[in-house]
Image (cartoon, rainbow, N blue to C red):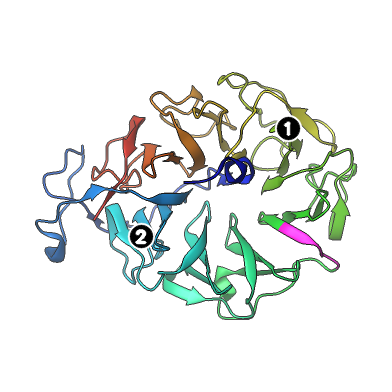
Amino acid sequence: MLSARARDVVILAAVLVASPSCSERAPIVAPPTPTALGSASLAPSDAGAAPGLLRDATAVGAGARHACARLTSGDVVCWGANDRGQLGGGSEVAFAVAVLVPGVDHAAELAVSPDDFACVRHQDGGVSCWGHGTPKPLQIKGISGAIRIAASDGATACAVLEDATVRCWTMDDAGKPATDPAPGLRDVVMIAAASDHGCALLKSGAVSCWGDNCAGQLGDGTRVARATPAPVVDLARAVGVAVSPARSCALLPSHALACWGAAGWSCDAAVPDRCVPAGGKPGCGYLPGARPRVARSVTHVAALPAGRLGCVVLENGNVACWDGRVEAPTFPGAVGLVDGMTGAVAVSAGERHACALVTDGTIRCWGENDAGQLGNGVIGQASAVPAAVLQR
């Protein structure tokens, strides 16, 4: 399980990505006699399989319509949609229970994009990724000595190296060497990247950002885009950082959040904000200006708001989620405290579902389930009540 210190600095992006494609979806594989609203058939090799409770998880990440978990053994399992190779098994067959990602048995860290891919940092400092059209884990060129990784919206991922520099790549160019995302970016301990901007937590506790700045998401007091990192002004020492396309947030040592930039998915100021929950209830208020505004109502955070959908773990182990866009599809159990979710240490949210890691090493998921993304062996039946993820 995660230590109290580790739980304080775990930052998982919780993003509602673009609407699902209208193209034909891959077949869903589920256990026998599912109790789902929809029907599904078993692959021949799965006939008679009896999934059991997924245990010994140490990390969880939710993609758009899938999720993955790292286990204490260093193995990684995934479940849900697989039309872009998200499950890493080399096929496009989706699963409604967790299945092993072949060839990933020494994972030290897991990073799941809010879209359709995932990456792991191996114990030797190398990095492998799969999904976004790459159906099997692929080692990223030019990455060695990685100590931290992050996967963002779009197809972008980054690694912090032993020398405190950063290298990034896109899944579209995963066969090419990773590159430096911003000239002069040094002394980094943690990286967070969106499609058009990024922020880095430095050894000093300062945060520097670069890229698009249409909503003040760089936090430098302007709305001017920058190719080189600029320090966030008026920000106390941070211990974590997370970003979405038009917003950035930092976790402070006091367990408060400081956020700056736009509230929603883009720089459209007309999009209403659903801010950090206060006492489990969403507070509302657009984030004007480019300087950080501190929200002190959250005392213990395992995930930061990063887009249209945000979830946080509260100090008592409860989970609160909120929808950052009123026009977004309904997300079961998303507003305020999640009923029945206790003992959480980390949380991650996808397109219309979320998953939480519990202190006993199990994982609970809730929300939409059209692709088996809840991992409970049921397909087509949404659940506002967190369901335990099963493993094949």
Q: Which of 351 and 146 lies nearest the eye of the viewer?
A: 146
Q: Name the residue at 15% across, 61% down.
A: 46
Q: Position of residue 380 (x, y in %)?
A: 27, 41
Does 149 appear above or below 334? below
Does residue 66 appear anywhere in the picture? no
Q: Amino acid at mark 1?
A: Ser
Instruction: Give residue 343's mark.
Output: none
Q: Name the residue at 36% across, 58% down.
A: 77
Q: Is residue 125 left or right of residue 250?
A: left
Tell me the quarter of the picture where residue 183 sits: bottom right
Q: Which residues are magenta?
A: 184-189
Tell me the mark number nearer the camera, choosing from 1 and 2.
Answer: 1
Q: Is residue 102 left or right of residue 352?
A: left
Q: Position of residue 17 (x, y in %)?
A: 53, 47
Q: Name the residue at 57% across, 46% down.
A: 12
Tell me the quarter of the picture where residue 282 sits: top right
Q: Is the stretch drawn in magenta largely helix, strand or loop?
A: loop
* Image quarter of the C terminus: bottom left
Q: Check disc 1 and report the residue beneath it.
A: 254
Does residue 189 appear anywhere in the picture? yes
Q: Residues within 10 Å of mark 2 (few under 14, many from 20)?
A: many
Q: Residues within 10 Å of mark 1 (few under 14, many from 20)?
A: some
Q: Check disc 2 and report the residue beneath it.
A: 82
Label 1 or label 2, whichever comes before in sequence order: 2
Q: Which of 370 and 97 lies nearest the eye of the viewer?
A: 97
